[in-house]
Amino acid sequence: MNTSNVGSGEFTDFGANASVQVTDKFRIGAQFYDRNIGEIGKWRPAVDWAYGDYRFKNWLGIRGGKIKTALGLYNDTQDLGLLQTWAILPQAIYPLDLRSSTISHLGGDIYGALKLPKKLGTLSYTSYAGGRPQDPHGGFVLALASVGLTMHSYGGWVQGEDLRWNTPVKGLLVGASFMNQHITGDGVLTGSSSGITYLSGLLKLPVGSLEREHSKKDDYYQYYVEYAWRGLRLDGEYRREFRDEWVGYWEPSSTTMAVTFDAISDSRAWYGAAAYRVSKRLELGTYYSRFIADWRKDPSPPTNHVYDRVASARIDLTNHWYAKIEGHFMNGYGAFDSIRGFYGQQNPNGLKPGTNALVVRTGFNF
């Protein structure tokens, strides 16, 4: 995001999907997706998801392929704008920058739903494991490039669980998700697209030095609640992400690591949202989200937080065509690797502590 007073229309995405119920128990489907959001995506089409789903019983099913990842309320439905009030989901939890890396995994799921005794509601579960997709045009790679590190690869193994309880209280859902990643990456120290060699200077290593990293611990803990009553919907989520990455650098002419260290961060994010369906064609909503890049540090500097106050209106022009108008009033921009929309490449004169944005978005399905 450019924090100067400049508007941009560089926000376009497109998805096309199809699914077939092959038998009563077996279903297959796939979705292709493309986007251009500033420096992210750049019109490089990808398979969002493509999998087969076999359901033995209500309480047991399996999926295999490239599968949407169950993480919180909206991760596996963030591509379905027709179902959502917001033009942009709360970025504290669902950053657009990381969408292609978090929306799916290449592997398998076990899932099901259990009816609880004594009318205590329904418990749904998902357990999954697989590979995390690499995105050479996503936010993580862009963030590191802004400080002079070009990544050649970044991906790895992911596994997790999601448990959600449809309670006996009509319209009330509560749930929890856990995800563990083991990520490996390698890159090279370069000048950034804006000529920055920050890491090279900080580490006192020449441009061209090589980098390698791997996860020692990379865990997500997420908790969520949703309540719907008539035209009213309330929801909120909390996420903690703890990352401990071993990082090493060496010069190409040497086989010995010149610099090694652990890169540790403990980020926290949460939001609260409310939306009300005023009429068949109009829905109004608001949310407030907070992201703190490292909980161990003072959150007050703009380099350690992104707070976002949002007001939104959704207009359903037809049953298949909608428009959304949304105001964002943001404070802070986070650390360089927060990956929440703020990058040095787009802000060569520096980032401002406050940013306002008006988002006008339209979409259709058929």
Image (spheres, rainbow, N blue to C red):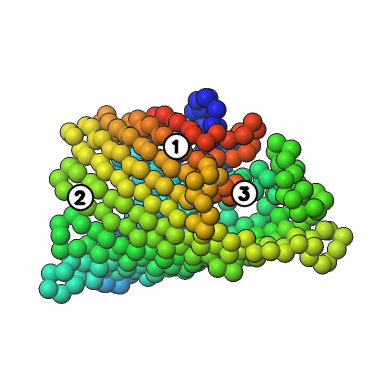
Res 24 seen here: no
Res 198 seen here: yes
Q: Amino acid at mark 2?
A: Ala
Most foreground residue, 66 or 299: 299
**Within 10 Å of the Cα at label 3, are there few (<14), some (14-19), or many (20+) other Cα atoms?**
many
Percent position of residue 28, x then y: 38, 59
The earlier-in-sequence mark between 3 and 1 is 3
Q: Which residue is mark 3?
A: 141
Q: Quadrant of the C terminus?
A: top left
The earlier-in-sequence mark between 3 and 2 is 3
Query: With respect to residue 264, does 313 lie above or below?
Result: above
Q: Amino acid at mark 3?
A: Val
Q: Which residue is mark 2?
A: 228
Instruction: Check residue 58 in the rendering and tell me which mark sits there, or answer none.
Output: none
Task: Kindly state the secondary structure of the residue where label 3 is placed.
Answer: helix
Q: Which residue is painted at 82% across and 67% down in the image?
A: 256
Most foreground residue, 126 or 339: 339
Q: Which residue is painted at 51% across and 62% down in the image?
A: 242
Q: Which residue is painted at 80% across and 53% down in the image?
A: 205
Task: Kindly state the secondary structure of the residue where label 2 is placed.
Answer: strand
Q: Amino acid at mark 1?
A: Met
Percent position of residue 127, x then y: 39, 69
Percent position of residue 345, x then y: 64, 37
The earlier-in-sequence mark between 1 and 2 is 2
Between disc 3 and disc 1, the foreground one is 1
Give the spatial CA distance, label 3 vs label 2: 38 Å
**Within 10 Å of the Cα at label 1, are there few (<14), some (14-19), or many (20+) other Cα atoms?**
some
Percent position of residue 3, x then y: 54, 32
Q: Which residue is painted at 64% across and 48% down in the image?
A: 144
Query: With respect to residue 120, does 101 lie above or below?
Result: above
Q: Which residue is mark 1?
A: 330
- Residue reaching furthest to the right: 253
